[in-house]
Image (cartoon, grey):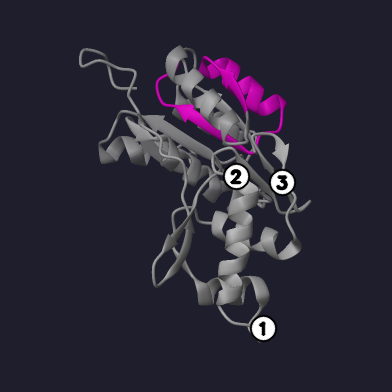
Amino acid sequence: MRVLVIEDDERLADVLARGLADAGHEPAVRANGTDGLAAALSDEYDALVLDWMLPGLDGPAVCRALRAAGRQTPVLMLTARQSVPYRINGLDAGADDYLTKPFSFDELLARLRVFARRTGHDEQLVVGDLVIDRDRRVVQRAGTAIELTAREFDLLAALARDPGVVLSRDMLLEDVWGTDFPGETRTVDVHVSEVRRKLGDDGPPIETIRGVGYRLVPPVREPVPSPLDGSAEPA
């Protein structure tokens, strides 16, 4: 996804941009509301990550101007303001979702995946440095192509749709091979073993949940701290 980050805190903006790029997205950054709105109106983005307090135009003003111009780009609002009235104001201004600082970067990525499903931009599944292009049926890890069979690709894609979620062998068998497949769940084990081998020892681990099934383990990220100290106004 092409993601526009509008954030005036340089350190946080850099963390977001690097994290989004590592997750396979194409980030662009603007440091104030005026430039951010101009970028959002002049180019096509799949999502906006928008801070509340910004120089020039604040986040709600950017949202209102964007919607007034007829742009329906999904907007994720970032702020340290946690009270209900502020959240309501942000949503009423046109934001689609709301994330309070400090936040987990994995949660931010999950909310962007929701946007992608809503807008049809979910052809790519990204887990750490693993990128699965379901449209072209191509898998890359850290920029290097990984050759998988058709069944292996479908199995990996099924696990990557919901990283961290345990899928039973029966669920994977039905999803990948179909309800009328005459084989046994042992087939799943054999294919998982082969996908693990091809991903390599340092690839995203496919964890065996004994007696149940498998899950693709997402990378662990530290929560993104608020850039504000206790004396600053919430952003």
**Crowd class of label 2 (few under 14; some 14 to 19; many from 20; radius 10 Å):** few
Left or right of residue 80: residue 157:
right
Name the foreground residue: 53 vs 191.
191
* 32 magenta-colored: yes
Where is residue 200? Give x, y as percent: 60, 44
Left or right of residue 230: residue 226:
right
**Crowd class of label 1 (few under 14; some 14 to 19; many from 20; radius 10 Å):** few
Of the numbered discs 2 and 3, the one sitting upstream in the chain is 3
Q: Is residue 119 visible?
A: no
Name the foreground residue: 107 vs 143.
143
Q: Is residue 89 visible?
A: yes
Q: Amino acid at mark 2?
A: Gly
Q: Mark 1 — residue?
A: 181
Where is residue 97? Give x, y as percent: 45, 43
Residue 223 versus residue 165 in the image, above or below: above
Q: Mark 2 — residue?
A: 200
